[in-house]
């Protein structure tokens, strides 16, 4: 067998025997048997490994891990991450369908910069300017006019010229949008249902992988604690002895602190934050009629990070036009979206989960890149640009 | 009630009564009851309709249908198309999972022109050239090295400066890729299993919609007829009295003829065509070792059109390099893909279905644009460029 090497694919014929007592390995599925090979056929060969693929942990620096993605993805520990990710997607779908949502497929090439701002990838579309969608927001809102409750998987793109551990230039978004919702609290119920069901079921489906990866099961409460932004900021100020009580958003550090609080006080890895300042949210977000400085918006935090964002939407045509004007959003590229409201859209709202972030936090990974098969950022598309 | 109008969203409180015998309408779900309204609240208003939304069929020209998409999608007949589409997606997933495939999420921004050629959308990626993927081909091949059997939903992009009834610039692709397949016939078994299961189950799930749309259930055979390209061309020549026996591919008219033959002779709306000329297929397609002029490739036709394409892949590193060279494919942008083979990939193959085309043919639509919520082509992104 001098011809065999690591990572070769082989076909083996032989007899399966019980292992001698001393050789039994409880850690692997095949630990109680061995194969007495009688014939081995090499299906594909491999060159020498650039690092030890047999080690229990790969322990590579992130850039090296990603530079050799086809190889490192074969490592049992890395592979398990993406089996769990498949279960997150599956569980999201099951939860969305339980709410009566129908799956829709929306385009990623658009002529509008959904969220405004400059962080869009521009492309030449048959001589016209087009953009990659920053979110499927406009299309899912259009769709509730027709199908009332929809869900979708979409890619979302942000040209963010910065490198953080929690941002990617291309992500997978899982969205629900639900019509005939009049009460804000109803939306929060749906949001929390999908969030906890998804994470809960995915963990159940992935029990074996979670154990193999040495990850604890998430703390899923009967009732997710809900705080207005200002309430959360009060708590954070108390917890930390200092605080940014009047900031328009939570900082990453704030998110960590409030999640620690939620776990300690409510036994919950989730916490819902509502009522972000209207100024800081996109034009389609409905201001709170009782206090228009704040909006009917929410984030769902999980294990120290925002994994979901959403809001009740402005569904009145005139109000939407004036919100766009206030926000300085040009109508160009939004003509079809605006038709939706011209011809009547019921009260509605929705939310959007990030697949990679959920995978990252569920498995305690330190960088969102580890939760993406082929992460895109400003430094890399498959290989590093500098290399 | 003078204030109410078409397409208004309303909240009604009242008493549900049985309809008088003479008013019963068997065609709708609520045809046996009526609501005696006691209180009506208007949730959203609508402007006057640009056409009659109450008609049983919309009967609009395609451009008008698409110009008013948020409105036309609300029509019961149009809405049903996309309920069926959701069931096609669901059934594909079920079939793929029955084969033991794990769902993966692959990027759409790439640095390689997957299939070679000029039909790519180029974008500026932080100052670097990048492309939208023409298919998730490279990534799904990488993934079978890790997970052995995978499936995925991806968007695929073609900058085709032509307008046909069966092409779009952005489509949804449903792919399977399966490793440790050595026999070509095994791949065909998988392909036909997924194809017939998907269409069969989707039709079952959509019985109500199919009936409402007046569409017949598809003819799904126990065994899908399989023909080599040359055999199919012989049959087509006989059927039509003329023929292009030595053409490298089937024409749209050929596809129609051979499907008619399959339905008549085998009671099948499906027919598998194999062994397309090696020259006409992408570099990753394995030539038939018995006759390298032809390749271990296949198309699955359904009701007169190709809905699926695939092949056994070249999995030997040196052979792949020489195939790329022959085809004039530059290695640039393929470095990571090539790593896969350098470190050993087992024998494998796969296939790829087009969601919009299946929806179109299953429902007898005359244009693939009717099977896409927001179709992209050279003339339109939501609205027409000329308008």
Image (cartoon, coloured by chain):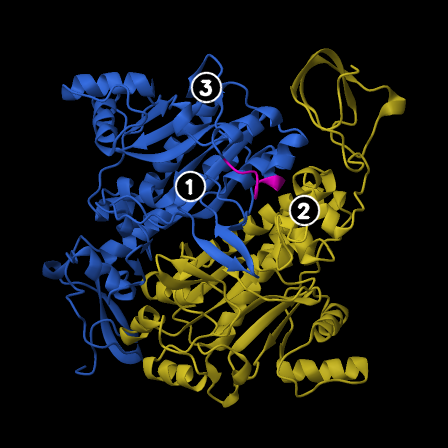
Chain colours: A yellow, B blue
Disc nearer the start of the sequence (1/3): 1
Q: Is mark 3 on a helix, strand or loop?
A: helix
Badge 3: how crowded within 10 Å, few (<14), some, or many (20+)?
few
Q: Residue A81 carries which label?
A: 2
Label 2 to label 3, Cα distance in Å? 33 Å
Residue sitting nearer the eye, B55 or A53: A53
The chain identifier of the residue carrying mark 2 reads: A
Q: Are marks 2 and 1 in contact (CB under 8 Å)?
A: no
Residue A77's x, y, as percent?
73, 42
Label 1 to label 3, Cα distance in Å? 30 Å
Magenta stretch, main secondary structure, is: loop
Classify residue A298 by image quadrant. Answer: bottom right
Q: Determine whether, in the image, residue A217 is placed left or right of residue B246.
A: right
Q: Is mark 2 on a helix, strand or loop?
A: helix
Q: Is mark 1 on a helix, strand or loop?
A: loop
Residue sitting nearer the eye, A167 or B31: A167
Q: Are marks 2 and 3 in contact (CB under 8 Å)?
A: no
Magenta stretch in the rendered image = B329-336
Q: Determine whether, in the image, residue A88 is placed left or right of residue A242.
A: left
**Position above or below: A145 against A174:** below
Return the residue at label 3. B185
Return the residue at label 1. B117
Residue sitting nearer the eye, B325 or A223: B325
């Amino acid at each position: 067998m001098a011809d065999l090497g690591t990572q070769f694919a082989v076909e083996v014929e032989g007899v399966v025997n019980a292992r001698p007592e001393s050789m039994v390995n409880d850690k692997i599925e095949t630990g109680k048997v061995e194969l007495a090979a009688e014939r081995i056929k090499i299906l594909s060969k491999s060159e020498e490994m650039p690092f030890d693929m047999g080690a229990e942990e790969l322990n590579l620096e992130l850039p090296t891990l990603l530079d050799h993605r086809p190889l490192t993805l074969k490592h049992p520990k890395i592979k398990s991450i993406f089996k769990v990710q498949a279960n997150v997607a599956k569980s999201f779908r099951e939860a969305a369908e339980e709410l009566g949502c129908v799956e829709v497929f929306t385009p990623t090439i658009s002529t509008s910069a959904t969220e405004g701002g400059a962080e869009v990838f521009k492309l030449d579309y048959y001589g016209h300017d087009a953009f990659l969608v920053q979110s499927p927001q406009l299309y899912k809102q259009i769709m509730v006019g027709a199908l009332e409750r929809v869900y979708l998987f979409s890619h979302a793109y942000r040209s963010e010229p910065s490198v953080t551990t929690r941002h990617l230039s291309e992500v997978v978004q899982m969205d629900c949008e639900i019509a005939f919702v009049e009460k804000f609290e109803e939306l929060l119920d749906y949001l929390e249902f999908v969030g906890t069901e998804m994470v809960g079921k995915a963990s159940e489906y992935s029990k074996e992988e979670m154990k193999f990866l040495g990850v604890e099961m998430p703390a899923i409460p009967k009732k997710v604690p809900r705080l207005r932004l200002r309430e959360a900021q009060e708590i954070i100020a108390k917890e930390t002895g200092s605080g940014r009580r009047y900031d328009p958003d939570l900082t990453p550090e704030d998110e960590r602190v409030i999640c620690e609080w939620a776990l300690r006080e409510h036994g919950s890895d989730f916490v819902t934050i509502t009522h972000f300042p209207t100024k800081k949210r996109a034009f389609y977000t409905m201001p709170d009629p009782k206090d228009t400085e704040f909006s009917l918006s929410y984030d769902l935090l999980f294990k120290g990070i925002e994994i979901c964002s959403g809001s009740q939407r402005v569904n009145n045509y005139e109000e939407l036009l004036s919100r766009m004007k206030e926000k300085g959003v040009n109508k160009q590229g939004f003509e079809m979206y605006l038709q939706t409201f011209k011809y009547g859209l019921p009260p509605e709202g929705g939310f959007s989960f990030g697949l990679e972030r959920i995978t990252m936090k569920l498995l305690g990974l330190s960088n969102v890149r580890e939760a993406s098969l082929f992460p895109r950022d400003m430094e890399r598309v498959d290989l590093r640009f500098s290399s």
